[in-house]
Image: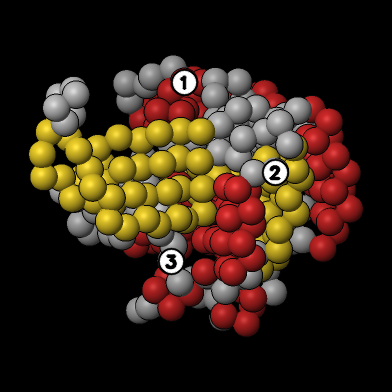
C-alpha cells in the first residue's frame, strides 16, 4: 500500500498527552570517585530532544503529515525549552501552563557508549489546568482528521474519557497508546496499541495464540473498541478487530535502540488513518516504521522517503 506525500500532508493529527524533554549528557569516564564506588563523568556534550507525546507529534510531522500538540507543562526553564524545540519541528503547540508543575525531564548520563544513570524530574498537574485543556480540545477538534492520545501516566490525561467521547461523536478516529492496568477509561476508542508487557498487566499472561486471541477480543468487546493492536517486538504485531486477526512479522534488521519505537508505530498509524487508510492498510506500514526506528539511537523518527522506499 502506498500513499503520496501530498495526500499525507493533508492528514492533520491532534496529539494529546504527556510531553517531556529527553536530555542527554555525554562525557568521558576516566576514574572512579574517591567519595563512593561510582564513575566520575566529565560532561563534554549536552543534547535535548522532545520526548513523550512531543516525540509522538514529531514522528507525525517527520512523515510529512501535520500535528498539533495539546499538553500541560510547568512554567519553568524546561517548558520553554520544550516549546522552542516543538516549534522548530513545525508542530502547532497548545501548551497549558501550571506554575506548580515541574515539566517532566528525563536526564540520561552517557559514558563509554552506555547509559550510566537516568534522573527523572516530574510531578502531577492540577485539575484546573487539565480541565482548561478539555475546553481547548473541543475548540480545535474539528480541524483535525485523527486524534492520538499518548498516555505516559504523568497525569495529563485525567479527562481522557470525555475527550474520547467528544472525538467519536465528531466522527474522528481515536488512537491510544495506553498506560496502567485500568483500560476502562479508554472505552469507545478506535484502537489501542499496548505492547506485550502492557497488555499482560490488563488481561494476564497467555500460554497460546488461541488464549491470546480469546482474551484480546474479550477486552475489545468489553471496552467497545474497533480494534486492539498488540506490538510484539521481535514477533511483529497483531491487529484484533471485527474481521478477526491480522499479523505482520517484524522487519528483520539489527536492533540498536528500542527507545520511542512505540511512539513511531502509533504516530505512523494515526498519520495514515488521518489520510484515509484503514487500520488494516496502515498497520504493515506502521510495523515497517517501527523496524526502521529501532535501527537508530535514542528517540528517533522516520521520514516519508524512508517509509516508502521500495514500495
Quadrant where the image shows the C terminus: bottom left
- Which residue appears at 11% of the width and 45% of the height? 30
Query: How far apart are the two marked residues, 2 and 1, measured between alpha carbons?
Result: 34 Å
Q: Where is residue 171 drawn, in percent x and y?
A: 81, 52
Foreground residue among 106 and 152: 106
- How is the protein colored in the picture? secondary structure
Local crowd at mark 2 within 10 Å, few (<14), some, or many (≥20)? some
Disc 2 target residue: 75
Q: Disc number at residue 302?
A: 3
Q: Quadrant of residue 285?
A: bottom left
Q: Where is residue 267 drawn, in percent x and y?
A: 55, 56
Look at discs 3 and 1 and give the one toward the viewer: 3
Query: How far apart are the two marked residues, 2 and 3, measured between alpha carbons?
Result: 31 Å
Local crowd at mark 3 within 10 Å, few (<14), some, or many (≥20)? many
Which residue in the rendered view is the most extreme toward the top? 204
The answer to whether residue 125 is above or below residue 228 is above
Query: How far apart are the two marked residues, 3 and 1, measured between alpha carbons?
Result: 29 Å
Q: Where is residue 33 drawn, in percent x and y?
A: 16, 31
Q: Is label 3 in a helix, a strand or a loop?
A: loop
- Which residue appears at 48% of the width and 74% of the height? 304
Q: Is label 2 in a helix, a strand or a loop?
A: loop
Q: Disc number at residue 201?
A: 1
Q: Quadrant of residue 204?
A: top left
Q: Where is residue 226 drawn, in percent x and y?
A: 65, 41
The answer to whether the residue labelled 2 contacts the one labelled 1, judged by CB atoms less than 8 Å apart, is no
Residue 44, visible in the rendered structure: yes
Q: Quadrant of residue 76?
A: top right
Residue 244, visible in the rendered structure: no
- Which residue appears at 44% of the width and 62% of the height? 301
Look at discs 2 and 3 and give the one toward the viewer: 2
Q: Is label 1 in a helix, a strand or a loop?
A: helix
The answer to whether residue 79 is above or below residue 205 is below
Amino acid at each position: 500500500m502506498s500513499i503520496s506525500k501530498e495526500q499525507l500532508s493533508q492528514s492533520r493529527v491532534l496529539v494529546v498527552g504527556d510531553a517531556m524533554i529527553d536530555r542527554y549528557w555525554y562525557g568521558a569516564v576516566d576514574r572512579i570517585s574517591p567519595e563512593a564506588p561510582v564513575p566520575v563523568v566529565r560532561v563534554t556534550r549536552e543534547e535535548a530532544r522532545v520526548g513523550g507525546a512531543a516525540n509522538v507529534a514529531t514522528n507525525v510531522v517527520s512523515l510529512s503529515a501535520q500535528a498539533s500538540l495539546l499538553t500541560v507543562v510547568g512554567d519553568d526553564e524546561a517548558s520553554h525549552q520544550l516549546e522552542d524545540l516543538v516549534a522548530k519541528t513545525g508542530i502547532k503547540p497548545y501548551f497549558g501552563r501550571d506554575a506548580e508543575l515541574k515539566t517532566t525531564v528525563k536526564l540520561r548520563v552517557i559514558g563509554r557508549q552506555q547509559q550510566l544513570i537516568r534522573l527523572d524530574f516530574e510531578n502531577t498537574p492540577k485539575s484546573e489546568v487539565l480541565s482548561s485543556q478539555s475546553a481547548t480540545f473541543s475548540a480545535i477538534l474539528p480541524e483535525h482528521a485523527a486524534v492520538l492520545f499518548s498516555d505516559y501516566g504523568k497525569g495529563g490525561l485525567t479527562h481522557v474519557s470525555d475527550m474520547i467521547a467528544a472525538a467519536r461523536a465528531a466522527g474522528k478516529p481515536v488512537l491510544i497508546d495506553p498506560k496502567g492496568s485500568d483500560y476502562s477509561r479508554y472505552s469507545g476508542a478506535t484502537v489501542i496499541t499496548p505492547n506485550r508487557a502492557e497488555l499482560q498487566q490488563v488481561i494476564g499472561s497467555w500460554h497460546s495464540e488461541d488464549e491470546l486471541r480469546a482474551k484480546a477480543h474479550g477486552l475489545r468487546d468489553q471496552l467497545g473498541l474497533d480494534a486492539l493492536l498488540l506490538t510484539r517486538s521481535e514477533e511483529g504485531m497483531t491487529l484484533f478487530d471485527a474481521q478477526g486477526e491480522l499479523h505482520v512479522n517484524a522487519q528483520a534488521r539489527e536492533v540498536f535502540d528500542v527507545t520511542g519505537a512505540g511512539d513511531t508505530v502509533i504516530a505512523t498509524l494515526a498519520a495514515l488513518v488521518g489520510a484515509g487508510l484503514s487500520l488494516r492498510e496502515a498497520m504493515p506500514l506502521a510495523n515497517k516504521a517501527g523496524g526502521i526506528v529501532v535501527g537508530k539511537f535514542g528517540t528517533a523518527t522516520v521520514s516519508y522517503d524512508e517509509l516508502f522506499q521500495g514500495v
